[in-house]
Image (cartoon, rainbow, N blue to C red):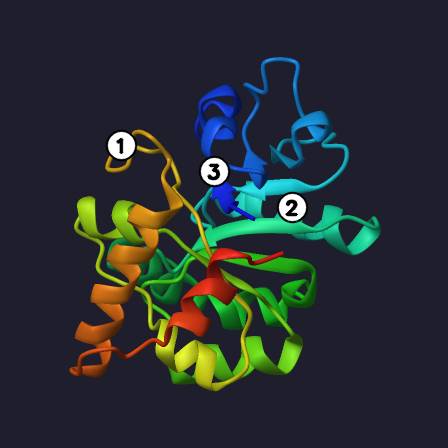
Amino acid sequence: MKFNAFCTANIMTARADCDKLIYCGSDSGGHGMDVGATVYAPFCDGAIGNIYLTDMSDEDAFMSACDHLISSDVRAVVRTAYELNETGMIEAKYKLSPIMLLHKMGVLDKCTIAGGVCLDNDDLDLMAQEGVALIITPTASAGYGHGYAPVCAALRRGIRVGVGTFDGKYNPAHELDRELEFLRLTANAEMRVENALSASQLEKIKNFC
């Protein structure tokens, strides 16, 4: 099975290479569950169903999203800790990392984290404790100059890790094998060894569900 864990691109483009996907965006082209997608709508006041929070830097939107999660039986994909500026802005404002802030607000256990380049050991420990999954976007994180997520450190803690293409700018065909090859190389860089991830680990990441 091919499984694109996270995609903000046009669903009609992504579906050619994905049997299932978590799709975040409004341009579904009238398609959704019929193509194996779990749709997360961008958060706005009055949101219905699962939500996608594009970042946590807008305080009003973030607080409203937290209220929505607490008061309803929905889940969120939160794109955060995906680059230094975003993470630094949140830490400067709240004196907490994005993950610790989500935990303080009481919503971390209802979230899946997308991005995750700037996660530290304390963040990963908290995510493992709360059963929070991590979706990484290898080509986008590398292409935009954000870095790479600490995948090996996450896996050691038992965190469920998935892979996604994000907007497809650096992977226009939304090919999961391309994402996995980037992931394999960045994991080697993370651990400073060859073959840091086994074939079975890569397959499990690919089939995240």
Residue at 74% x, 46% y is 68
- Three-letter residue code for mark 1: Lys
Q: Nearer the viewer, residue 134 or 19?
A: 19
Residue 188 vs 108, above or below: the answer is below
Q: CA distance from mark 1 to mark 3?
A: 11 Å
What x and y, as percent, mark residue 43? 61, 36
Residue 135 vs 194, above or below: the answer is above
Residue at 58% x, 49% y is 77
Judging by the rendered image, the residue that carries numbered circle 3 is: 7
Please, which residue is most extreme toward the top here? 29
Judging by the rendered image, the residue that carries numbered circle 2 is: 65
Residue at 27% x, 65% y is 184
Label 2 or label 1, whichever lies nearer to me, is 1
Q: Local crowd at mark 1 within 10 Å, few (<14), some, or many (≥20)?
A: some
Looking at the rendering, which quadrant does residue 118 occupy? bottom left
- Three-letter residue code for mark 3: Cys
Judging by the rendered image, the residue that carries numbered circle 1 is: 169
Residue 149 vs 165, above or below: the answer is below
What x and y, as percent, mark residue 127? 55, 75
Label whose residue precedes the other's in the sequence (3 or 2) = 3
Residue at 34% x, 60% y is 87
